[in-house]
Image (cartoon, grey):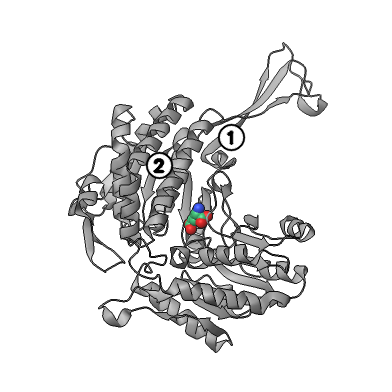
Amino acid sequence: MKKEIIERLGIEPVNPGVCTGLHWMDTKGKELISVSPINNKEIARVTMASLEDYESVVQKAQEAFLVWRETPAPKRGEVVRQIGNALRESKEDLGYLVSLEMGKIYQEGLGEVQEMIDICDFAVGQSRLLNGFTMHSERKQHRMYDQYHPLGIVGLITSFNFPVAVWAWNAMLAAVCGDVVIWKPSSKTPLTAIATQKIIARVLKENDVPEGVFNLVTASSGVLGDNFVADRRIPLFSITGSTEVGKRLAGVIGARLGRSILELGGNNAVIIAPTANLEMAVKSVVFGAVGTAGQRCTTTRRLIVHESIYDTVVEKLKTAYESVSGKIGNPLREDTIVGPLVSENAVEDFLNAISKVQKEGGRVLFGGRTYDCENRDFCHYVVPALVEAENHFEMVQRETFVPILYIMKYKTIEEAIALNNGVPQGLSSSIFTENLRESEQFLSETGSDCGIANVNIGTSGAEIGGAFGGEKDTGGGRESGSDSWKSYMRRQTNTINYSTDLPLAQGIQFGF
Ligand code: UN1
């Protein structure tokens, strides 16, 4: 662990976990120990929020909203522009901490911070484009238009795997939209959240951003769980996590008619068609399946290969996995491409999934075991697995958040699309083909049923410019680019009568 980086980021041995912008609260909750999955050693501690601390944060957020919603949107964008620059300055440091605390390789840590910078740039432009339509009224001397107003407090619940980028996708858009955010980070990655909050502090200070626009609440689920999403003072929640947890939370939010953006499980497939460029396809599948040690929502979990090239693809993949398995280890080392899993529980999930799928008839073609665990007193590393399986197997239908790639065969493109769609989740999908008809079919209304569908690009590594999210058990709702900003605002339709008459719509006569 590089002490100077940790210090530069303002991380102390013990850190308060609750902040309203510049002010760090003297938190009264329990202590949380952040441990690096790299070596199972403590990085630092965080004192978590009590319910009382949370109450103070909500009050601050409510007050801040009253000021922030009236701040002109391009001025809010200017703050976000400066946040982007602050992140640029701290890119290497924050990327390092992401890698240290979460376990993804340093290159991907840097990529994650770049994703934050990119969404800042995007949000700055958006701050001048919060546009509605004008409509022609059916009534004489009437004007109609719709406009978007700030919504209020946005609750953000983020996951360990993208500990800071997902905050940025949501918080930067929310901020230009005039909202304030309360961020509850994963209890596995509180330090990256604290560091991020410290990076943006100078910008908040220099711009007199009211205390309470960007809030951080590190809390245990026992203190802040269902009661958080039940809080009627928070009109919108954006939640990243498992389908199981998401379903429960969505139920609580739905019961009070709150809004939610849910980014839950994926079970993403790549189809490799007979005309595919196999070099490209295999490279992309390996990045998709073993990148981030299989811990992305967009990780490639299923591979659907045309029977005519099946054996060739399997051989190429085995060779690629062989070379990958020589590059497992400390994610901060330059030559590593597969870091640790986040916890020993994740390793157990990995081993359980392998043994269960074997019982169902799956055949392990490569890996599927722990890596170098006998030489440590902890076990976080695994050899990514290639498993021949069938789509209907229970384990294949599930998202296990580890590097297991299930491989299966197809005969016709219709069958391949049916396999792609034949799981409960619907986040990302892709096809490798040089055949235009196949590619268009895959992207058509009869094609992939996922929120993301790609051609000759893998399932993971989406750019921020597109709307991000999925269908079915992935939860629905979109974050990030395109017109996702609309979810963070309330829409109002306005009709103005500038005549001296009172004609009713639809020509209704109502004389009295
Ligand atoms: C996630 O895993 O929660 O498309 C997000 C990707 C990244 C984001 C993944 N841009 O893989």
Residue under circle 2?
A: 181
Residue 387 drawn above or below residue 415: below
Residue 445 in percent (x, y) is at 75, 56
251 and 86: which is toward the camera: 86
Mark 1 near ligand 1 (CB under 8 Å)?
no
Q: On the rendered structure, is 42 left or right of 68? A: left
Labelled pair 1, 2 in contact (Cβ < 8 Å): no
**Disc 2 crowd, CA 10 A, few/some/many (<14, 14-19, 20+):** many
Residue under circle 1?
A: 491
Q: On the rendered structure, is 95 left or right of 25? A: right
Task: Kindly identify the residue that appears in the image at 48 percent across and 39 percent down.
Answer: 173
Query: From the viewer's perspective, is the residue at label 1 or at label 2 nearer?
Result: 2
Rendered image quadrant of residue 502:
top right
Q: On the rendered structure, is 463 left or right of 332? A: right
- Amino acid at pointer 1: Arg
Which dot marks residue 421? none
Residue 418 appears anywhere in the view: yes
Disc 1 from disc 2: Cα separation: 19 Å
Label 2: which secondary element? strand
Residue 36 drawn above or below residue 217: below
Quadrant placement of the C terminus: top right
